[in-house]
Amino acid sequence: MDFQIIVFVIATFFISAFLKGITGLGFSTICLPILTFMIDLKSSIPLVILPSISSNILVMLNAGNFSVAAKRFWKMYLSAIPGLILGLWVLNSVNSSSARAFLGVVLLIYTIWALSRSEFVLSARTASCLTIPVGTLTGFVNGVTGSQMIPILPYLLSLKLEKNLFVQSINISFTLSSLVMLIGLGGLGLLDQQTLFLAGGGIIPVAIGIKLGGKIRKHITDEIFRKLVLIFLILVAFSLIARI
């Protein structure tokens, strides 16, 4: 990678972490589409793993409720692993343009759903039945696209969890998936020394971005920022789909 691309990657890490500091969500989902404007998706996904893990841990430390979330959703977390392995196999088998378009569709579905502010609530029985399918599908989508939010995000929102429990629950999923993906990408030969070095260097701007985002959040309405981020993601999704 030349110097221009390295600066672009670091700046993308910072922006994505800054937005995650505001919302508590979405580092990989925001970071990957931006990176694909200059870097192939198969190369972008390995780059975000270490910064993503660091951003998740920083958020988890502030959220608390780790044991409560782990006890309640452990089946969902474990079921994501086979889905993730299958998704990584698909990623290694498809061309980059198809994977990029799929990521665009995933982003578009999520943002349209989020902007609708659906008040749909799952019953306890239905939620229990969906735990394993949601985990497996989330792992698969993550493996193919690098996005960790579909369908686990709408699923958890439909349970009306307390705010900190929600943040902890979804970030445990993010962290576990990222660790498994790190191993899987290494097995597929998609990780190299240069990628790991650049990804490791991204941890510092990620920490700074999350800290600044958290400070800004105290002074600006959450709803305004939420809508701005979602609108931005819709634009990125359309651009990814248009570049098939």
Image (cartoon, rainbow, N blue to C red):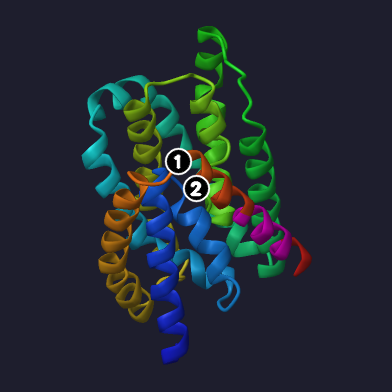
47 and 15: which one is in front?
A: 15
Q: Residue furthest bottom?
A: 2
Residue located at (57% from left, 16% from top) = 121
In the image, the segment drawn in magenta is: 232-240
| Residue marked by disc 2 | 225
Is there any visible trace of residue 48 in the rendered image? yes
Q: Position of residue 8 (x, y in %)?
A: 46, 79
Q: Is residue 46 above or below residue 216?
A: below
| Residue marked by disc 1 | 222
Find numbered disc 1 in the image and state the secondary structure of the residue it sits on.
Answer: helix
Q: Could you say which quadrant of the image residue 182 lies in? A: bottom left
The residues tagged by marks 1 and 2 sit, at their Cα atoms, a distance apart of 5 Å
Find numbered disc 2 in the image and state the secondary structure of the residue it sits on.
Answer: helix
Residues at circles 1 and 2 in contact by the CB criterion of under 8 Å: yes
Q: Is residue 204 left or right of residue 189?
A: left
111 and 124: which one is in front?
A: 111
Q: Position of residue 145 (x, y in %)?
A: 58, 55
Dominant secondary structure, magenta = helix
Is there any visible trace of residue 182 in the rendered image? no
Q: Could you say which quadrant of the image residue 101 lies in? A: bottom right
* Identity, as a three-letter code, of the amino acid under mark 1: Asp
Circle 1 residues within 10 Å: few <14, some 14–19, many ≥20: some
